[in-house]
Amino acid sequence: MSLPLRTVHVNTERTWRGGEQQTLSLVSGLRKRGHEVWLVAQPGSPLARKARDLGIEVAEIPMRGEADLVAAWRISRLLRQVDAEIVHMHTSHAHTLGCVGSMIARRGMRLVSRRVDFTIYRNRLRLSRYKYGRFVDRFVAISQAVRQALLDDGIDGQRISIVHSGIDLDRHPLVAPEEVAARRRALRQELGVSENAELVLNVAHFGWHKAQEVLVQATPAIVAERSQALVLFAGEGELLDKVKAEALALCPKDRVRFLGFRQDIDRLLDGCDVFVMCSVMEGLCTSILDALARRRPVVASEVGGMPEIVEEGATGRLVPPRDPAALARAVVDLLTDRQQAERLALAGRERVESRFSVDAMVEGTLGVYRDVLRGDTGGRVVKAELQSIP
């Protein structure tokens, strides 16, 4: 696959979350390797803006759900225009739109990234059996757990490849201990707490599967054992008010803080003592990768793809899902035994470096493209300028 590939990527999200970061990292990495890349994104979305800032060709097409035939037709025009070899779809709605567009245009092998580990049959009519049928050439699962969920739903294993999500390690350079100490002091000053405060951090969208209420329920036991502990939540979402109300009812005053949406997550990670992800379903979790890359000890639920990152007693602590008592014990252990916490955090950083970098993700995805195309790029290289898509 020495010749440049012509790839079109479709992402229908209007907001910025982990899947959009992975999409941007992939298209950027492909472009750096000399491949031709076009991105279809929602008009004015953060993904469209960030991609254009990186010099990536972006077609901003309004996509109003997966039944938007106008959007599918516009995607098909782009696929014909650039003579696409790969159509890579990165969201559930993109899955449908990209497949329909590809069939109209008669262009491109069709790949779908799958980032969640719940069943594809959430509709009682089981209509997904058509969507996940023969129209997709390959599913790209971000973890073994996601692959297993697809297998359980009857998807042929020959049509599923695993490529772990990756993070940009250049964003997480190793810093000297005195600089880490300075960052810890700065965060505590911002929060108005003692320099001895022990900060427990969760960063996630407030959705049902993130289950922040489990950490709220664990907080009374944590602060009973660690008098300086303060639990921090960063993020927004539809269940934020509900979780706040539960915290107000259960937790001692001033021992829980809700920080809202933050742009400075790396700064929060540098200042925390323990990072917690208490999800009940999780495809992989790049937030854990970010925490480990910054050498923060992690406690995670033993669900989904998280055990592929966090190995109990080796790179972090794993606890059963929806078990506040077990979660509290693991957090208290790490706050109490700082040598254990440091050992796990360092081992976690090493695992991220070896298995979960952006470079590994891009190369793994190229390997899937190579497999799907059977090593044949068609012998044609077209340098197309992206025109406006009406």
Image (cartoon, rainbow, N blue to C red):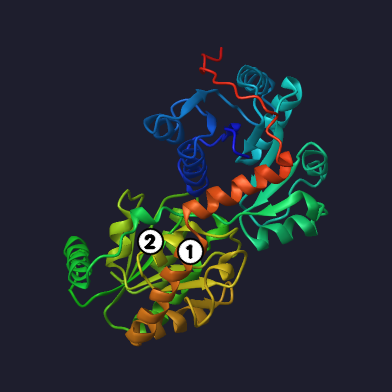
Q: Is residue 195 above or below residue 211?
A: below
Q: Is residue 271 above or below residue 331?
A: above
Front residue of 178/230: it is 178
Of 116 and 377, nearer the camera is: 377
Identify the residue under disc 1. 212
Q: Quadrant of the N terminus?
A: top right
As measured in the structure, the alpha-carbon distance from the residue carrying label 2 to the one carrying label 1 is 8 Å
Q: Quadrant of residue 66?
A: top right
Please rate how many residues cluster around mark 2, counting C-alpha atoms within 10 Å: few if below 14, some from 14 to 19, many from 20. Answer: many
Residue at image coords 35%, 52%: 260
For numbered disc 1, what is the local secondary structure? helix
Quarter residue 338 falls in: bottom left
CB under 8 Å between discs 2 and 1: yes
Left or right side of 335 for 359: right
* In-image side of 13 versus 294 (left or right): right
Q: Position of residue 88 (x, y in %)?
A: 63, 37
Residue plotted at (73% across, 54% down): 119
Q: Which residue is drawn at the image coordinates 39% and 64% (left, top)? A: 293
* Residue 212 vertical placement versus 364 (above, below): below
Say whether disc 2 or disc 1 marks the residue closer to the N-terminus: 1
In the rendered image, residue 109, in percent from the top left (x then y), is placed at 72, 34
- Classify residue 256 by image quadrant: bottom left
For badge 2, the amino acid type reads Phe
Q: Is residue 225 visible?
A: no
The label number, if any, that marks residue 233 in the structure image:
2
Q: Amino acid at mark 1?
A: Gln
Q: 333 or 250: which is nearer to us?
A: 333
Query: Element under label 2?
Result: strand
Q: Give the residue displayed 53% in from the left and 34% down from the top.
A: 35
